[in-house]
Image: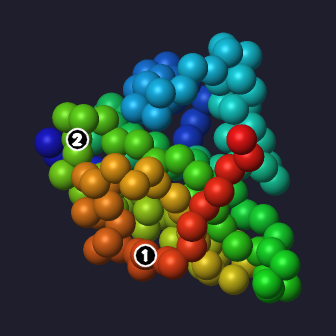
Amino acid sequence: MSEITVRALSRSDRPSWETHWTAYLAFYEQDLEPAVTDGIFERLRAPGSHSAFVAVSDGAVIGFVHYLFHDSTWSLQKVCYLEDLYVSASARGSGAGRKLIEAVYEAADNEPGASGKVYWHTDQDNKRAQLLYDRIGELSDSIRYVRR
């Protein structure tokens, strides 16, 4: 695999992004209506909403990260939620995941009115991802609940 670069998601990335998005959803056992995927892609391209980077190697998209800034009741500055991160199975271990997270860190540091704080979640059994997260982040004591 050649050098990995990270750049903003572009409209022309739609076919490869959707291939990876579908694999990401399958990993989390999610099935979304096509209209939701269409809306998500448009939201990722709209200013003031979600944002996205893609990792590219040899001219091909090999992964993505989605993130957004939001207000917090614990700060007057915005915080950044890294919502989705995916790297294709063939590119895992290449450094693409780290580069995508670091791109979000940089975006958080440069976002006007933001604190630079970045947080994310993963499933307890996603051990492979946690190997990276343990090196690039800090595990919090928080426990996440969801509505039944």
Any part of residue 91 in sight: yes
Q: Name the residue type under label 2.
A: Ala
The C terminus sits in image quarter = top right
The N terminus sits in image quarter: top left
Relative to 75, say whether 129 is above or below.
above
Q: Residue at x 57, y 67 (%)?
A: 143
Query: Which residue is tagged 2?
Result: 91
In the picture, the disc for residue 139 is 1
The residue located at (54%, 26%) in the rendering is 30
Category of crowding for the residue at label 2, using alpha-carbon neighbours closer than 10 angstroms: few (below 14), some (14–19), many (at least 20): some
Considering only vertical position in the picture, is 141 above or below 16?
below
State left or right for residue 90 relative to residue 141. Answer: left
Q: CA distance from mark 2 to mark 1?
A: 25 Å
33, above or below 62, in the image:
above
Name the element at disc 2: helix
**Amino acid under disc 1:** Leu
